[in-house]
Image (cartoon, rainbow, N blue to C red):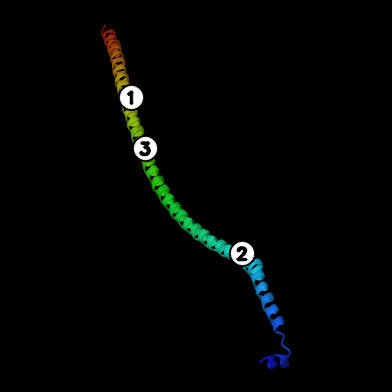
Amino acid sequence: MDEIINAFGIDTRLIIIQVVNFGILMVALGYFLYKPILRVLKEREDKIAQGLQDAEAAAQAKAEASEEKQSILTNAHMEAEEVAKRAKSAADTIAAEIMATAQAKAGAVLSEAEIKSEQIKSAALKESEKEIATLAVLAAEKVLRQQA
């Protein structure tokens, strides 16, 4: 076997040194290059996973906010309808009160007008009685003058 190794010109010391150098190079590359690259890749993987979790949380928060928005809008519409109903009810009550007041005032004015018309009728009747009495006296005087 030494003859074959010598025939090809292989130096065993040189091969052993190269194997040792390769082992040292592998250890050095593993320590200075492979481990830092794996650490950077792990950090990047963690950042991506955190980003995905944050995106999922944001999507869930958006969905919850959308549901809450819809709930708030529904409640606001219901409250607006309730306020409108109460306002209409209050307006109807006020309108009824105004109508009752107006009818009472109209009744009072009508009653007062009837009293005044009765007073005017009574005064006119008294005055017409006076005039009739005066005319009757004048007519009687005239009749008496003509007979005398």
Residue pointed to by mark 1: 113
State the residue in front, 96 or 61: 61
Q: Which mark is residue 40?
A: 2
> Within 10 angstroms of label 2, few (less than 14), some, or many (20 or more) residues?
few
Which is more N-terminal, label 1 or label 3? 3
Residue, x 39% and y 48% (percent of image)? 78
Q: Tell me how far mark 1 sits from mark 2, CA to CA.
A: 105 Å
Q: At label 2, which amino acid type do we have?
A: Val
Residue pointed to by mark 3: 90
Quarter occupied by residue 110: top left
**In x, y percent, where is residue 105?**
34, 27
State the residue in front, 44 or 97: 44
**In x, y percent, where is residue 4?**
69, 93
State the residue in front, 85 or 6: 6
Q: Which mark is residue 15?
A: none
**Is 110 on the left-hand or right-hand side of 9?**
left
**Is 119 on the left-hand or right-hand side of 15?**
left
Give SS at disc 1. helix
**In x, y percent, where is residue 39?**
60, 64
Location of the N terminus (image quadrant): bottom right
Front position among marks 3 and 1:
3
